[in-house]
Image (cartoon, rainbow, N blue to C red):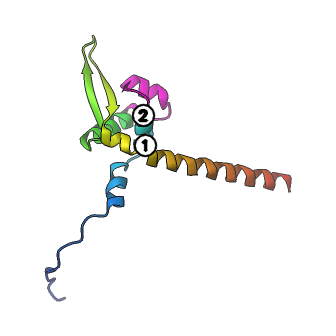
């Protein structure tokens, strides 16, 4: 039998800001949803059209999560049938430069990969 676990007398460190912001973006498609909402408010069907590879179930889950985390707001429209419009909050908009920077690096990685593939094909 092992020794009993003692409680630490040291205060835990503050949470890591990077871990916190990455936690906001966890889940498949979350950055994509935020990016699609960067231009203007969008309805669910419009978002599905903007991201054809996402399923309705996953999009619905991401929108709920982002709303819960304070990144997206949902406004019910007075239409028949009822529909809702989603938009970014000010906190959600603060993520746009970071998402743009990641997309920029992604474009460079794709260019590098394509250049590498062309070199391999020529040799």
Question: Which residue position holds label 1?
Answer: 96
User: Residues in magenta?
Assistant: 39-56
> Relative to residue 33, is residue 3 drawn left or right?
left
Pointer 1 local density, CA inside 10 Å: few below 14, some 14–19, many at least 20: some
Q: Nearer the viewer, residue 41 or 53?
A: 41
In the depicted structure, whether residue 43 falls above or below residue 100: above
Looking at the image, which residue is at 86% across and 57% down? 123
Instruction: Name the image quarter holding the N terminus.
Output: bottom left
In the depicted structure, whether residue 60 falls above or below residue 15: above
Q: Position of residue 41 (x, y in %)?
A: 37, 26
Question: Which residue position holds label 2?
Answer: 38
Q: Is residue 41 magenta?
A: yes
Q: Is residue 44 magenta?
A: yes
> Relative to residue 31, is residue 71 drawn left or right?
left
Q: Position of residue 40 (x, y in %)?
A: 40, 27
Pointer 2 local density, CA inside 10 Å: few below 14, some 14–19, many at least 20: some
Looking at the image, which residue is at 28% across and 33% down? 73
Q: Are marks 1 and 2 in contact (CB under 8 Å)?
A: yes
Q: Position of residue 64 (x, y in %)?
A: 28, 37
Q: Nearer the viewer, residue 91 or 58?
A: 91
Name the element at disc 2. loop
N-term mark: 1 or 2? 2
Question: How far apart are labels 1 and 2 at the CA level?
Answer: 7 Å
Q: Nearer the viewer, residue 11 or 59?
A: 11
Name the element at disc 1. helix
Q: Position of residue 26 (x, y in %)?
A: 37, 50
In the depicted structure, whether residue 44 falls above or below residue 21: above
Looking at the image, which residue is at 38% across and 35% down? 59
């Amino acid at each position: 039998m092992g020794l009993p676990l003692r409680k630490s007398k040291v205060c835990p460190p503050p949470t890591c800001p990077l871990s916190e912001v990455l936690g906001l973006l966890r889940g498949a498609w979350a950055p994509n949803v935020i990016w699609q909402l960067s231009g203007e408010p969008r309805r669910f069907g419009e978002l599905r059209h903007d991201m054809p590879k996402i399923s309705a179930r996953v999009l619905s889950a991401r929108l709920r999560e982002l709303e819960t985390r304070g990144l997206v707001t949902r406004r019910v429209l007075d239409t028949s049938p009822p529909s809702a419009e989603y938009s970014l909050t000010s906190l959600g908009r603060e993520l746009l430069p970071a998402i743009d920077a990641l997309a920029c690096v992604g474009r460079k990685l794709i260019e590098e990969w394509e250049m590498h593939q062309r070199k391999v094909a020529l040799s």
